[in-house]
Image (cartoon, grey):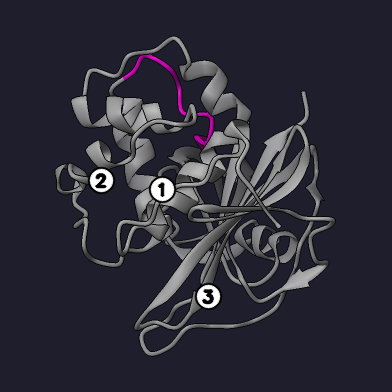
Amino acid sequence: MPIHADEMSGLHNFGSTCYVNSIVQILRYTKPVVADLINETPSNETMKLFLNLLYQDADAMPFISRLKDIGFHPHMQHDAHEFMITVLDKLYESVPTKNPFEGTFETTLTCERGHTRTVTQPFTSLSINGSVKDGISELEQPEDVECKCEECDLKRMSKQTQVKPGKAICVHLKRFNASQKLTYRVPILQSWKDYELIGTCNHIGCMEGGHYTTSAFTDNGWYMFNDEHVTKLHRIPETSRLPYIMVYLLNE
């Protein structure tokens, strides 16, 4: 049954803003985000309004009215993953704190003669197909690529990528292609290596329209956040077709 305690407050849906609500709720329970930003004041006015939402009971309307500042329309449906990546980028550009979702891809290229070259590239989200375990493993699978070796000019090299996450991991499940929503079922993996699941953003509906909710692990257990309605969960399912974003935190 819905609860209304301040520490578990829901968020009003202003017509098509469930994508905002779901991301706010999942970030509220991403402890490296709220702990590192509690004493920060963003230089960007819109991000000040967004940061207020992460600490409960703030009026959401001032931020909603400025969604256009970051490329979103307050009266249109938008993608929750696109919103999450955009708002995190804007937020951490406006404070001197590192984004805990930022990790690196470390890619090593090796030619047949044994020459190697390693490059690193930052990421804030892992977009995968299928389960967390299989999807991340697929990102790390070696492959042959057309690439010129800087040492010997051979034009084919082996590419091997290692995923090195930060304190938090945003796993984005590819649920949409050019023509339809992909409703494949995935295991709800409670842990991956040294990381623990703390939340999922769930999508219900189709490409043309739908609704976002969040399941988040709090100090009082798992809760479902569906706009204004907050419901305690006795458990989360072992598998589901609903997860769209899954957030993991490093055990420290």
Q: Is residue 243 above or below residue 234?
A: below
Q: Which mark is first along the chain, 3 or 1? A: 1
Q: Give the side of residue 222 with respect to residue 171, left or right.
A: right
Please give the name of the residue rendered at 21% of the width and 24% of the height, measured from the top-left corner. Answer: 44
**Whole-number angstrom distance, CA of label 1 to CA of label 2:** 14 Å
Image location (x, y in percent) of residue 51 = 38, 28
Alpha carbon distance from label 1 to label 3 = 18 Å
Can residue 13 be seen here? The reply is yes
> Taking 250 as reference, is 126 above or below it?
below
Dot 3 alpha-carbon crowd within 10 angstroms: few under 14, some 14 to 19, many 20 or more: some
Residue drawn 44% across and 40% down?
A: 121
Element type at mark 1: helix
3 vs 2, front mark: 2
Magenta region: which residues?
95-105
Task: Say which residue label 3 marks.
Answer: 204
Q: Quadrant of residue 82?
A: bottom left
Q: Disc 1 marks which residue? A: 84
Q: Earlier in the sequence, mark 3 or mark 2?
A: 2
Q: In this view, does 185 lie above or below 247?
A: below
As drawn, is 105 to the left or to the right of 88? right
Within the magenta stretch, is there residue 249?
no
Q: Residues within 10 Å of mark 1 (few under 14, many from 20)?
A: many
Q: Position of residue 144 (x, y in %)?
A: 55, 66
Looking at numbered disc 2 in the image, what kind of residue is underneath it? Ile
Residue 64 is labelled as 2
Percent x, y for residue 188?
76, 62
